[in-house]
Image (spheres, coloured by chain):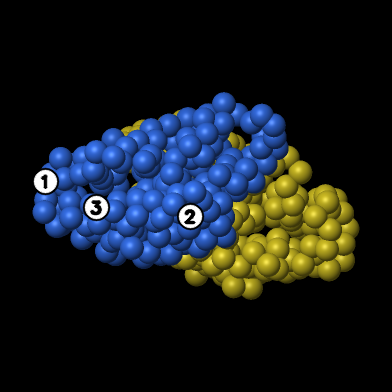
Chain colours: A yellow, B blue
Amino acid sequence: MNLLAVSGSLREKSSNTAVLRAAALVAPESVLVTLYQCLNDLPHFNPDLDTEPGPPAVLTFRALVRAADAVIMCSPEYAHGVSGVLKNALDWLVSSGEFVNKPIALINASTRATHAYASLAETLRIMMAVIVPEASITLALTNPKLEAADMAGDPVIASQLRASIAAITQLIGSELRHRQ
Amino acid sequence: MNLLAVSGSLREKSSNTAVLRAAALVAPESVLVTLYQCLNDLPHFNPDLDTEPGPPAVLTFRALVRAADAVIMCSPEYAHGVSGVLKNALDWLVSSGEFVNKPIALINASTRATHAYASLAETLRIMMAVIVPEASITLALTNPKLEAADMAGDPVIASQLRASIAAITQLIGSELRHRQ
């Protein structure tokens, strides 16, 4: 199974990106977690540019989302809102529809960031993505300087991330069985 | 008085941008409404780049906001959320604080776009901007193809925009008198 991990922060030492890297570390062998690292290459969304074929970076992003069995997402909250850079990436998927029926694990790396999380969930719902409740967890990171390896080595965080991945892969597995 | 107009859309024929151009057309002579046209030049927000002095386009944007007596803002809603490109611009002002105590006329060009408007208002509040209620209006645009001149020539829309500008200039005027 192939999960695309999308972080809402471009910061090199972002906790949100570290969470996704930790998810890749603790995932079982049968699950490949690939971090999307080209958020910065997407142009600013402009409906005038949202034509066939579209900007190259957008095409790549759409193809990666389309090819993924699910998306695992973790984003900071900026000023009580979704990070602009992540929302910009989502804006590029609204008309093309790659998120329709796509299972999403929406991970919150902060117990206090409730506004952005709710707003992001609302946007994903209206884009017809399937937010998987059991895979959508809030982590209580005690230290903002934790790196991916630290998180993967922390029994509580690692266990939460493994449970999230298990929930989303279970859903994908049962969907695949239904199609057969 | 000097109002900076910020549209949340990069679309050339954006209704939101047209609303701001119409505001410039109907404003009294004593009020200069300047449309900020460089939203597309701002880099994607990255805290690692948010250092002194900062990216040139960001410095220009911050200087324009600082120099403005108030900001007049009109943004589309994308997928029940704030347009990523506008949120990205706001993300650049969080740490530098140009919006603190800045009067804002938050104009909604759609009676149906309630999610993004509420989310934008929440972000502006946490940035300590002053959303002026009497200046923050919702327009019932009957035709999405209306251009700025059409709006300025429409008695209802023109009157709403004039009232919004009057409310914000009245507030600025009373603040200036208080400081004297």
Which label is found at residue B153? 1
Q: Earlier in the sequence, mark 2 or mark 1?
A: 1
Which label is found at residue B6? none
In this view, the residue in front, B42 or A12, is B42
- Amino acid identity at mark 1: Gly
Where B133 sits versus A149, above or below?
Answer: below
Where A145 sits versus B96, above or below?
Answer: below
The structure residue drawn at horizontal position 68% and vertical position 67%, both measured from the top left corner, is A112
Chain letter behind tag 3: B
Mark 1, other Cα within 10 Å: few <14 / some 14–19 / many ≥20? some
**Label 2 secondary element:** helix
Q: Earlier in the sequence, mark 2 or mark 3?
A: 3
Q: Can the viewer see residue A20?
A: no
- Amino acid identity at mark 3: Leu
Q: Can the viewer see residue B149?
A: yes
Task: Report the side of B113 relative to B47 (left or right).
Answer: left
Could you give the CA–CA distance between mark 2 and mark 3, rounded to whole angstroms? 26 Å
Mark 2, other Cα within 10 Å: few <14 / some 14–19 / many ≥20? few
Which label is found at residue B161? 3
> Image quadrant of residue B140?
bottom left
The residue furthest bottom is A134
Chain letter behind tag 1: B
The structure residue drawn at horizontal position 79% and vertical position 62%, both measured from the top left corner, is A141
- Amino acid identity at mark 2: His
Chain letter behind tag 2: B
The structure residue drawn at horizontal position 70% and vertical position 63%, both measured from the top left corner, is A110
Q: Quadrant of the N terminus of chain B?
A: top left
The residue indicated by pointer 2 is B178
